[in-house]
Amino acid sequence: MSCKKRHPDRSSTTAETRQAPERLSRYRRIAVFGGDGRHRGRFPTESAVEVFAARRYSGNGTVERLYITVSNYDLVIILARWNDHSSTVQIRRRCRALGVPVEIWP
């Protein structure tokens, strides 16, 4: 027997995260922070979804725009894989101060 840790099947993880959970349909306005802007189709059509692209995808100024307008949203979803640490911390602190729920997605 090998002492190596077994990693979960990565294909099942990506299949689970392709579609947003149904529970998100209760939120009227959702802000998605990160990625390149192609995630809009993953979310419920009943919700108004605005995508703020990550800096690496020419999302210059999106952190500042989201920081200013975060109180307009019922939920902020941060796509952690696509953002730098300082941007994520900045948005999380602002949401906490304003009482806006935040979810971190891989």
Image (cartoon, rainbow, N blue to C red):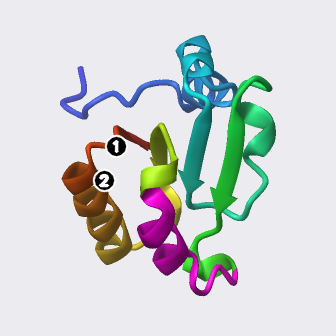
The overriding secondary structure of the stretch rendered in magenta is helix
- In the rendered structure, the answer to whether residue 8 lies left or right of residue 24 reads left
Residue 12 magenta: no
- In the rendered structure, the answer to whether residue 73 lies left or right of residue 94 reads right
Crowd rating for badge 1 (residues with CA inside 10 Å; few <14, some 14–19, many 20+): some
Q: Earlier in the sequence, mark 2 or mark 1?
A: 2
Mark sitting on residue 100: 1
Residue 66, given in percent of the width and then of the height, sits at: 50, 67
Q: Is residue 20 visible?
A: yes
- Tell me if label 2 and label 1 are in contact, CB under 8 Å: yes
Look at the picture and state if 37 lies above or below 47.
below
List the residue tagged with mark 2. 95
Residue 60 magenta: yes
- Asked which secondary structure carries label 1, the reply is loop
In which quadrant of the rendered view does residue 62 lie? bottom right
Look at the picture and state if 54 lies above or below 102.
below
Mark sitting on residue 10: none
Amino acid carrying label 2: it is: Cys
Crowd rating for badge 2 (residues with CA inside 10 Å; few <14, some 14–19, many 20+): some
Residue 41, given in percent of the width and then of the height, sits at: 81, 37
Span highlighted in magenta in the image: 58-70
In which quadrant of the rendered view does residue 37 lie? bottom right
| Residue occupying the point 60% across, 80% down | 56
Look at the picture and state if 53 lies above or below 27.
below
